[in-house]
Image (cartoon, rainbow, N blue to C red):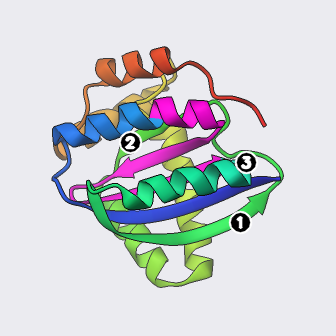
Amino acid sequence: MITQLLYTSASRYPRGHPTDFQILAEALERNTQLGVTGYLLRDLASFCQVLEGPDASVDLLFSEIARDTRHDRVVVRMRRQVTERAFLGWSMGYASLSPVDAEFLATRFADGRGGVLLAFDRVGRIAATGSWAVPGQGSTGARRAQKKRRAEGPAFDVCDVAAITRRAGPPARS
């Protein structure tokens, strides 16, 4: 079984701050070492992240994340056991949240467990259509979504993120 954990937190810095790039670079490396896959979403002031992998690896990684001083108000929104990964092939995907997506997620998190499942589904759809972390994977719709997200605020340069992804290599399989 694979453990999936979804959490949110408040960033101590605005989106586009150099610490965002540091977080992504560290996550790519550490997740690969631990056999963890996942996806990090960023709006102007907060993070939403899904981690998935072996139970002990997810627990270790999340304990490190919870102690990270670059964010606070860390809240586990969902933890569950599943038979397969939702983000297979992503040592760490990344996307900026649009204001509409951020509002949707905030509302769903307030709705309790049923809302969190809807939020998890939305994270998966954002990953499928709006990722910047995997080079060469993007439809015309995904490119439009990327342009829209870029217009909404500062974000990582796609070339920088792609370079980190290539260096990190593929995640370990469970």
Residue at 52% across, 56% down: 62
**Residue in the foreground of this view, choosing between 105 and 34:** 34
Q: Amino acid at mark 2?
A: Ala
Q: Amino acid at mark 3?
A: Pro
Q: Residue 64 location in percent, x, y?
A: 46, 53
Q: Is residue 22 left or right of residue 62?
A: left
Mark 1–mark 2 distance (CA, rounded to whole Å):
23 Å
Q: Earlier in the sequence, mark 3 or mark 1?
A: 3
Residue at 29% across, 35% down: 22
Q: Residue 37 location in percent, x, y?
A: 60, 40
Mark on residue 54?
3
- Residue numbers of the magenta segment: 28-52
**Residue in the foreground of this view, choosing between 27 and 110:** 27
Q: Earlier in the sequence, mark 3 or mark 2?
A: 3
Q: Mark 3–mark 2 contact, CB under 8 Å?
A: no
Helix, strand or loop at label 1? It is strand
Picture quarter with the C terminus: top right
Q: Earlier in the sequence, mark 1 or mark 2?
A: 1
Nearer the camera: disc 3 or disc 1: 3
Q: Residue 77 location in percent, x, y?
A: 53, 72
Mark on residue 95?
2
Q: Which residue is mark 1?
A: 80
Was residue 32 drawn as part of the magenta stretch in this picture?
yes
Mark on residue 139?
none
